[in-house]
Amino acid sequence: MDLFTLIILAGIIILLIFFLSFIPVMLWISALAAGVRISIFTLVGMRLRRVIPGRIVNPLIKAHKAGLSVTNNQLESHYLAGGNVDRVVNALIAAHRANIELSFERCAAIDLAGRDVFEAVQMSVNPKVIETPYISGVALDGIEVKAKARITVRANIDRLVGGAGEETIIARVGEGIVSTIGGSKNHKEVLENPDMISQTVLKKGLDAGTAFEILSIDIADVDIGKNIGAILQTDQAEADKNIAQAKAEERRAMAVAAEQEMVARVQEMRAKVVEAESQVPLAMAEALRSGNLGVMDYMNYKNIMADTEMRNSIGRATREEMNDNKNNNKKDK
């Protein structure tokens, strides 16, 4: 075998490999064996449209074997829109087996909306239980009550597009629990009848506008929390005490200011008296010079001043003696 023949054989092999990689012949044969009629040119067209043929043909074979009337154009258009073809076909098969009416268009819309349509179909057949965290409410007697609920929901396929999710269900149930506990006369009423919470919440139709249908709400646990009423009263009493102390401090400051003002006035008056007393000798000297005051008048004035000073000293001595006697009597006792 010469070199030219080897080159021709290598070229044929390369062309054959390229042909088999670009044209999925084996996938076409598998489709024919499964009874799915699809032309080889359709598969080539998928390659040209940058669609992986296996992502379309394999779900198409699965749908055909399940008895579903789904075309390759529907699956290809959903793939090009960014949807999950395999998940949509699985959901259609599950809905068909469970006798749930679900069209391809609605199933594709649910998938493109970002929801797991296969999980939704499974939830329609087998309801899901959602457990809420402990939700606190305060009864009218001021006692905090904590309750945990288990919500049994079933997916509502008709409202999966545009319907609210599990978070909305939990929030609405929590709001209902808080309002029910808050409307109870005391915490004992809630502890005695926990089903009162579930009955009240179910009557409000909390699943409106959501992607689920609430089947039941069961109270799993009820616990007692803090005495919120007593805490609030304590805080109020502390606040009242602080306000009273602030007002008392204000009155004390005003009294101190008034006392200081009085002391300042007394000092001012004493200064005026001292100033006036300092003018007396000058006035008397002037009176003596002018003849308005005689020598005998001046001597009488001095005698009166001496008598007054003597009486004051006697009075001080008497008061000191009386205070000493009182102190001695207290010590003796």
Image (cartoon, rainbow, N blue to C red):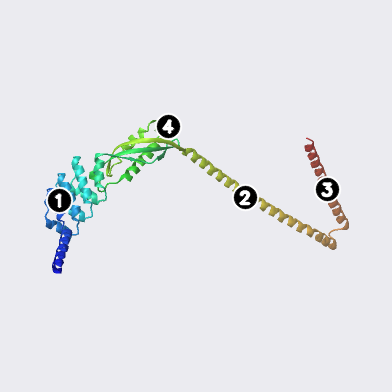
Q: Which quadrant of the view contains residue 68?
A: top left
Kind of residue at badge 2? Ala
Mark 1 or mark 2, earlier in chain:
1
Which image quarter holds the N terminus?
bottom left
Q: CA distance from mark 3 to mark 1?
A: 137 Å
Mark 4 or mark 2, earlier in chain:
4
Mark 1 or mark 4, earlier in chain:
1
Give SS at disc 4: helix
Q: Which residue is mark 4?
A: 188
Kind of residue at badge 3? Ser
Residue at figure coordinates x 71%, y 53% from the top left:
266
The spot of residue 96 in percent (x, y) is 18, 42
Q: CA distance from mark 4 to mark 2?
A: 51 Å
Q: CA distance from mark 2 to mark 3?
A: 38 Å
Which image quarter holds the C terminus?
top right
Front position in the image: 256 or 81? 81
Give SS at disc 3: helix
Q: Which residue is mark 1?
A: 30
